[in-house]
Image (tube, rainbow, N blue to C red):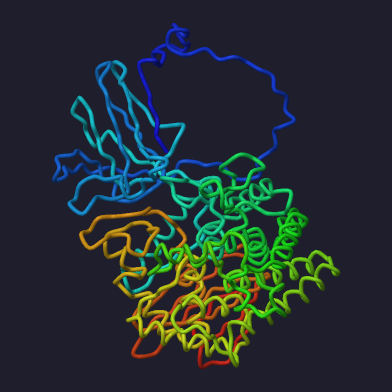
């Protein structure tokens, strides 16, 4: 996060094949034999350089010399030029300009750990050729401080990320939506560096909440299995003796000691975050048709699930009146919770309430989903006794949730959108109840002037919950909303990646928080599976698009584990025409509103 300091004068002369005056130019190293028992192979892909971008030099109102590479990326700046020995060059990397058009890195600062993203370079005599090798930065803009005149043509920005290929294409008749899709893809590239990280600047940490919220979308955008599989192994390696799995993997603190805030509150095991340990292997298995990761980590997942079951046996005293005694042991409200993190309108009081009271609605919904997933995985692995146990317990948890949070099959909550999305997405409602809940959700959005107000744990399911249950037009209303909170707000402000916060710019145009957090880019998954209707699960392909005339047309291609799938639609003279391509050796179901279900073989179809 600090950057790199490099003194090129200590390099040995390029014209010599051997190091001369080695002792004067480099510090000596010792050769030690530590054995190889502690070494394990890394079963993933390497991190490699990819796109190269060229710079445009700008002079800010404050008189700063800044290189603008046109795209917020994660990587490094390389340069090559001739200069005199001892000349100094400093490169400071930032994501955005401030409200006055000046360079800034204030938006991603952490007071406890300042993030410099700075390269300090001292020139050698003659040709200087360099790029960092011990760090990477998140940036679009680079402020240059030098005691010599620079040529912007000498500088290149190089994007680095895990060597996984892009597997999705999307376009439509609204340029801002196309940019949104590209922003989501760029944020995924920039944060999939060996493991999925939350942001490339202040933390670079493998936060589990981001990982589980994005897994569905990530599997469309890029061939991400090796990165996610490696990350799950990191989470398993950090599992504690009591079964809890860390919320950050690889662990960022002392091995064996749980992550704590203020040295008191343990954040490991946080609901909706550490639950990634079941969610990610399950989702990978369903999409890729490979249960290897589930088999590898099944016993570890059982230990984590056992801890959740034990955790549910306790209830916070303040919630005893809310949670009926009969159902308390099937609900989770204890220990650390982030709640509906970054929900618009949250303040300090919200987090104080979460710390003091927990959020049993969130805890119980995830508890049910995890038990449901464990039952399915146990069945696939032939663990019949486990399957029956998890299934029966899941039914009791579901009954507890419905008793407390529903009334006659309707959601009791009347103000928060997340309280409707979660029971739909977690399958806590019947199909009829989901349709009713989606209708109420659409009315809430209408009252909120077509703005969303979901946070980290439901935004990725919001649009899908609407489209699939009769409120497709409202899902498009959200997509096309250009005011905050909404996906296109950042696009209209010129962002080229996904920001961390809905209100990433204040009224004066000043930025705050990270501008490269991939989580809210999960809407790209909805563009693939609902707008264009490409769905792949358990080796089956279903094409079920939900068109809207405001996009005029939409086209998507997905290079799936089973071959390339194409789904397109366009409006012509008030009618919708469809184009579908199914890969070799596969069959598919095509579901189009107003038509009978079609079962087709590999081929090209015009409908």
Q: Horizontal placement of 577 versus 339: left or right? A: left
Q: Horizontal placement of 354 versus 152: left or right? A: right
Estimate the x, y position of residue 416 in percent, counting from the top left: 45, 78
Q: Horizontal placement of 202 versus 151: left or right? A: right
Quarter of the picture containing the N terminus is top left
Q: Horizontal placement of 392 versus 555: left or right? A: right
In-front residue for pair 519/71: 519
In-front residue for pair 514/593: 514
Within the image, what quadrant is residue 589 found in?
Answer: bottom right
Q: Which residue is found at the position 27% from the left and 23% from the top?
A: 88
Estimate the x, y position of residue 499 in percent, counting from the top left: 37, 58
Q: In the displayed image of the protein, which residue is found farthest to the right?
A: 385
Residue 225 in the image: above or below residue 176: above
Estimate the x, y position of residue 442 in percent, counting from the top left: 43, 85
Residue 344 in the image: above or below residue 124: below
Q: Which residue is found at the position 61% from the left and 84% from the top?
A: 429
Residue 347 in the image: above or below residue 433: above
Count of marks, rendered view: 0
Q: Which residue is found at the position 41% from the left and 73% from the top?
A: 453
Residue 519 in the image: above or below residue 549: above
Estimate the x, y position of residue 219 in percent, counting from the top left: 56, 62
């Amino acid at each position: 996060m600090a950057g790199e300091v490099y003194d090129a004068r200590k390099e040995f002369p390029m014209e010599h094949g051997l190091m001369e005056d080695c002792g004067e130019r480099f510090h000596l190293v010792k050769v030690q034999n530590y054995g190889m028992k502690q070494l394990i192979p890394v079963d993933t892909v390497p991190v490699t350089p990819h796109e190269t971008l060229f710079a445009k030099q700008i002079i800010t109102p404050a008189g700063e010399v800044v290189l603008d590479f046109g795209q917020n990326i994660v990587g490094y700046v390389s340069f090559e030029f001739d200069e005199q020995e001892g000349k100094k060059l400093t490169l400071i990397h930032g994501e955005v300009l401030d409200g006055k058009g000046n360079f800034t890195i204030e938006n991603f600062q952490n007071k406890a750990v300042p993030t410099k993203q700075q390269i300090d370079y001292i020139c050698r005599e003659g040709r200087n050729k360099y790029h960092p090798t011990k760090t990477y930065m998140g940036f679009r803009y680079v402020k240059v401080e030098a005691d010599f005149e620079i040529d912007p043509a000498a500088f290149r920005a190089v994007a680095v990320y895990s060597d996984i290929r892009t597997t999705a294409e999307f376009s439509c008749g609204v340029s801002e939506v196309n940019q949104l899709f590209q922003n989501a893809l760029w944020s995924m590239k920039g944060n999939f560096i060996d493991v999925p990280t939350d942001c490339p600047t202040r933390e670079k940490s493998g936060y589990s909440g981001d990982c589980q919220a994005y897994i569905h979308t990530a599997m469309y955008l890029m061939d991400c299995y090796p990165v996610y599989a490696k990350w799950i192994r990191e989470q398993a390696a950090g599992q504690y003796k009591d079964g809890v799995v860390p919320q950050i993997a690889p662990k960022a603190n002392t091995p064996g000691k749980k992550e704590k805030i203020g040295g008191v509150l343990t954040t490991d095991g946080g609901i909706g975050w550490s639950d990634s340990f079941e969610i990610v292997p399950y989702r990978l298995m369903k999409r890729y048709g490979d249960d290897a990761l589930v088999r590898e980590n099944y016993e570890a997942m059982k230990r984590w699930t056992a801890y959740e079951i034990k955790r549910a046996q306790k209830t916070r005293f303040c919630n005893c009146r809310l949670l009926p005694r009969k159902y308390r042991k099937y609900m989770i409200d204890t220990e650390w919770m982030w709640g509906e993190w970054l929900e618009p309108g949250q303040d300090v009081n919200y987090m104080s309430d979460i710390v003091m009271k927990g959020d049993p609605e969130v805890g119980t919904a995830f508890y049910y989903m995890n038990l449901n997933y464990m039952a399915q995985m146990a069945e696939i692995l032939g663990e019949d006794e486990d399957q029956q146990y998890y299934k029966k317990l899941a039914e009791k948890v579901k009954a507890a949730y419905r008793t407390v949070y529903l009334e006659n099959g309707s959601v009791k909550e009347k103000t928060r959108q997340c309280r409707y999305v979660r029971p739909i997405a977690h399958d806590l409602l019947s199909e009829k109840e989901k349709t009713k809940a989606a209708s109420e959700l659409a009315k809430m959005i209408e009252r909120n002037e077509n703005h969303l107000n979901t946070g980290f744990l439901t935004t990725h399911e919001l649009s899908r919950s609407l489209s699939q249950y009769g409120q497709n037009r409202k899902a498009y209303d959200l997509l096309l909303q250009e005011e905050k909170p909404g996906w296109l707000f950042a696009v209209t402000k010129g962002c080229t990646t996904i920001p961390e916060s809905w209100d990433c710019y204040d009224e004066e145009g000043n930025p705050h928080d990270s501008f490269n957090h991939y989580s809210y880019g999960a809407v790209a998954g909805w563009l693939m599976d609902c707008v264009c209707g490409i769905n792949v699960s358990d080796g089956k392909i279903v094409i079920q698009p939900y068109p809207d005339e405001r996009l005029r047309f939409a086209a998507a291609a997905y290079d799936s584990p089973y071959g390339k799938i194409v789904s397109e639609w366009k409006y012509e003279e008030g009618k919708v025409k469809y184009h579908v391509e199914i890969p070799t050796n596969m069959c598919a179901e095509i579901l189009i509103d107003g038509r009978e279900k079609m079962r087709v073989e590999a081929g090209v179809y015009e409908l």
